[in-house]
Image (cartoon, helix red, strand yellow):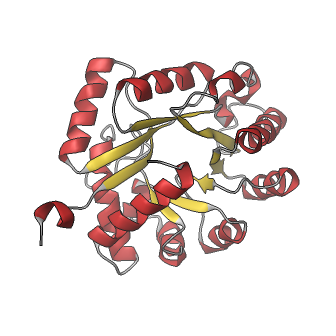
Amino acid sequence: MNAELSRPKWTDSHCHLPEDLDKCLEVLNGAASAGVDRLIDVGTDVSRSRAAIKRAETYENVFATAGVHPHDAEAGIDGLEELLANKSVVAVGECGLDYHYNYSNREAQKISFAEQIKLAHKYDLALVIHSRSAWDDTFDILDAEGIPDRTVFHCFTGGAPEAKKALDRGAFLSFSGIVTFKNAPEVREAAALAPKNRYLIETDSPYLAPIPNRGKPNEPAWVAIVGESLAVTRESSSLVVARETWANASELYKLP
């Protein structure tokens, strides 16, 4: 078999690239060496979204999202909509609810989330959801606003019940280095039941480095480690996981 065809080719479907362009290039070169050929650089407020767009315009095979994270919800979403027409933007988000930290009050989080769902509908963009300790309200708001056709729960931290609710609504599930953690059996259970056309893989770098690198700043090059863990969980192979998640990222984000 041709070595190029047998080499896993990965999409890191959710990462936060360094703002420093020299460091960013170093991270991207490391990712490319590890077979990570596409990256989704995720915005978490208007300023960071604008920076992600600039990186996507600068580097090949990097795509941007534009959104306001629940931590920043109290600042509102003014200025976000004007970014969504940029051709490098493939999704709205990450947005959603975080009741674990409550850095923004819950009412502001709900309003910001609902407004960004509306924008995903308006611009026919994918929606990237952050949901932590807020499953009931997350699903309630999605049901009220109508879940966009292309929606992903990034860094999925729920178990089988939450996975089924998300999947029943047509969403994708994206799995991070948490699947390698010993104390996350419920996440692996969710990963095992996700259909082959409805799951993705991510690093969420620089956060959540997978074992054996836990505690270090994460990087997109390590998405393959997550993929290997998912392959074991799904009783599959790294090559199959790479191919399936590549196809799913292409569909979710309408990537070339």
**Residue 213 visible in the shown view:** no
165 or 92: nearer the eye? 92
User: Image quadrant of residue 180?
Assistant: bottom left
User: Image quadrant of residue 78?
Assistant: top right
> Residue 141: where, in percent of width, then height?
82, 51
> Residue 139: where, in percent of width, then height?
77, 58
Q: In the image, 214: left or right of 78? A: left
The residue drawn where x is 61% and y is 74% is: 160
**Residue 193 visible in the shown view:** yes
Q: Is residue 115 above or below residue 153?
A: above
Q: In the image, 21: left or right of 99? A: left
Task: Report the number of discs.
Answer: 0
Q: In the image, 120: left or right of 246? A: right
Q: Is residue 11 above or below residue 17?
A: below
Residue furthest right as drawn: 144
> Residue 63: where, in percent of width, then height?
45, 37
The residue drawn where x is 64% and y is 30% is: 84
**Quadrant of the image containing the N terminus:** bottom left
> Residue 181: where, in percent of width, then height?
39, 61
The residue drawn where x is 32% and y is 19% is: 21
Residue furthest bottom as drawn: 235
